[in-house]
Amino acid sequence: MLARIDKGLLLLARALMLLAGAGLALMMLQTVAGVVADNFWNQPIPGNLEIISVYHMVLVVFLPLAFVEWQHENIEVDLLWQLMPGWMQRTVLVLGYLVCAAFFAILVRQTWFDAVAAMAKGEMMMGNVYVLIWPAKFVLPVGFAAIGLVSLRHALNAALDPGFSPAPADPAEGHI
């Protein structure tokens, strides 16, 4: 049962990472197209900056959160970690992951309500052109929900598996 949950969460994390990668590629293409259009034809793409900052950057920042956490690649401070006995390390791990999951649950709730309110208002950004921004606001609760689920998975694994390690995955081993 836990293996199926792990497989599903990893699939979700990878899918969100792929979407973020597509957002990054689109951001690069759109930026290059904007520079070329402006420098060669003196015709900048209307709303280019707004679309890049509202859509592409949000995808690139928030969607990979779950995969980064899955790989244990988030920033951590381990000043006292080596001084703790093994049982305390596991306890701190479990509690830390549960606090993270609770924090992300709060963020999911709030960003969901913000996205729904923005959708109800038809929220737009005014620049050279009007750009609908409410669709991008739904990316945040998706990213936060995914990292929250991965944090819960880590808490469960840290509690049940004595060999669980929060060490980052080795890219040479093909975990990606």
Image (spheres, rainbow, N blue to C red):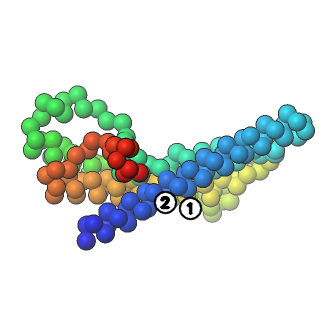
Q: Position of residue 40 (x, y in %)?
A: 88, 36
Give the percent coordinates (x, y) of residue 115.
56, 57
Q: Which mark is residue 34?
A: none
Would residue 50 be seen by someone viewing this image from the given angle? no
Whole-number angstrom distance, CA of label 2 to CA of label 1: 24 Å
Q: Amino acid at mark 1?
A: Val
For residue 116, say whether it is visible: yes
* Dot in front, 2 or 1: 2
- Give, as a three-letter code, the residue at label 2: Ala
Q: Residue at x 26, y 44 (%)?
A: 166
Quarter the N terminus occupies = bottom left
Tags 2 and 1 touching, CB below 8 Å = no
Q: Is residue 121 left or right of residue 61?
A: right
- Name the residue carrying label 1: 116
Q: Position of residue 110 (x, y in %)?
A: 46, 54
Residue nearer the viewer, 99 or 40: 40
Mark 2 and mark 1 lie on one chain; the one further toward the N terminus is 2
Residue, disc 2: 15
Asked where in the image residue 168 lies, by quadrant, the reply is top left
